Image (cartoon, rainbow, N blue to C red):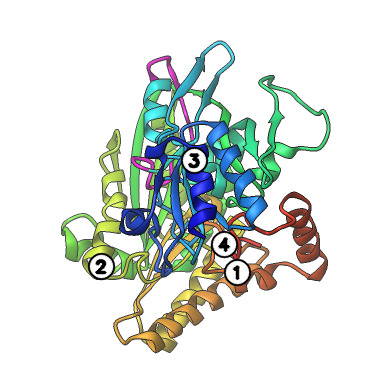
Amino acid sequence: MTMILDELVARLHPTQTLTGDATESYTRDASPAVPEMPLAVVLAESTQDVSTTLEWASTHRVPVIPRGAGSGVSGGATATKGSVIVSLERMKAIRELRPADRLAVVEPGVIIDTLDAAAREQGLMFAPDPASSAWATVGGAIATNAGGFHCLRHGVTADSVRALTVVLADGRVLRTGARSRKNVAGYDLTHLFVGSEGTLGIVTEATVKLEPIPRGQTRTFLVAFPSLMQAGSAVSELMASSITPDLLELLNRTTANLVEDFEPGHLDRGAAATLIGQVTDLDADAQIHQLRTLFARHGGEHFEVRKGDALIEVRKRVQPALAARGMGVAWMSSDAAVPPSRLSELLRHIEQLQIEDGRDISVVAHAGDGNIHAAVAGGAGGADDLAAAKRIVRAIAERAVQLGGTVTGEHGIGSLKRDFLALQFDETALEVQAHIKAALDPAGILNPGRAV
């Protein structure tokens, strides 16, 4: 393989290829997936670099793993033995900001918060905001179709993508979509690649939609409920109303107590569920009054309102609190999603699993869109304990599908959830996806063993 690799190195700049111990920091993502030793890491700086690498890899049947910031939690960017990792971190230019068209043209290594900050200087915003937005890249968000706190009001990443430049498995360069607001020419190839987790091609440029910064007052609220059913029914009524919050998050009792252990004084330890939400609008105070009345009808207690983002900081303490207890995504995490009207049923199922198994399950839900994040304690007892935690994650995914939902709402399948696909898709759907993969990557070199 050394001679084959020398051929690639000769076609790139000498500083663009890493081997041996120098590859270590590029081999893993934020999941518990265990990486293997790659052949090399390519630090791509242009579409041509990616095209050269894939043409070489296709010729020699070398697996290629695209990588952004490594913030994914499903094992989609971990190294496999003998693979070449294509890192896009050097491709971080914001090529164009077009306020009149409400568009930006960016390279895949641009940090999400960096793009949003640049847009805000023009009175606009980049809406996708996964929890890792301070270090996650636009390319990674596109690869996984990432969600975030504000996707309830603004949609997931796919809703913000207009056009792509993609390098295919054999090195050819494909351009999809258009910069116009409307475009119905041909198949929608753009959104075929969004969420494909690097299995169909590598995105090297994206044209993304920007939105006006919401106008008006910002009000954040917190309300506690004595039962998950009451919280769920309140969410259902809210989503059927004329109010669309910027965000609506739910914490179960386990999570509230973890946060209180970490930094006390904010949450009711006895509440079965706590909702934290935010409204930004010209009539935000009137909407808050409506919400207070709505929540009271469903048993909501201790309704609290603050200006700005103060209470959102309570929600953001969840991950540090989990990490302090060793229960973060380094163990087993579910991101199943259901229709919002079925959220309480999924939460009750998780509660029953927790009672039956006896282990902690922390749940944080993007309640308005029915997407839960359940961190299942596991791993302290070794491989068997981790396997038991994964069985719970699978049971959550299975129930979500039964309720009309999905096994993954925003983190993707990666390598850790491939056996969940059969829970959601029948044989025909799996075959169609396999045919698409075969058509675009006949040698199977792009992120093998991931997503499909």
The answer for how far apart the CA atoms under marks 4 and 3 are is 35 Å
**Nearest-to-viewer mark from 4 and 3:** 3
The answer for how far apart the CA atoms under marks 2 and 1 are is 32 Å
Q: Nearer the viewer, residue 384 or 3?
A: 3
Q: In this picture, which residue range is highlighted in magenta? A: 120-135
In this picture, residue 331 sits left or right of residue 50: left
The answer to whether the residues at label 2 and label 1 have Cβ atoms under 8 Å apart is no
- Name the residue at 31% across, 87% down: 381
The answer for how far apart the CA atoms under marks 1 and 4 are is 6 Å
What kind of element bears circle 2? helix
Residue matched to label 1: 418
Which numbered disc, 4 or 3, marks the residue that appears first in the sequence?
3
In the picture, the disc for residue 257 is: 2
- Label 1: few (<14), some (14–19) or many (≥20) C-alpha neighbours in 10 Å: some
Does 272 sit above or below residue 179?
A: below
The answer for how far apart the CA atoms under marks 4 and 2 are is 30 Å
Q: How far across and down, in percent of the image, does residue 316 sit? A: 30, 50
Amino acid bearing label 2: Asn
The answer for how far apart the CA atoms under marks 3 and 1 are is 36 Å
Q: Say whether residue 149 is magenta.
A: no
The answer to whether the residues at label 1 and label 4 have Cβ atoms under 8 Å apart is yes
- Label 2: few (<14), some (14–19) or many (≥20) C-alpha neighbours in 10 Å: many
Residue matched to label 3: 10
Q: Say whether residue 123 is magenta.
A: yes
Q: How far across and down, in percent of the image, does residue 313 sit? A: 27, 45
**Nearest-to-viewer mark from 3 and 2:** 3
Residue matched to label 4: 413
Amino acid bearing label 1: Arg
What kind of element bears circle 3? helix
Which numbered disc, 4 or 2, marks the residue that appears first in the sequence?
2
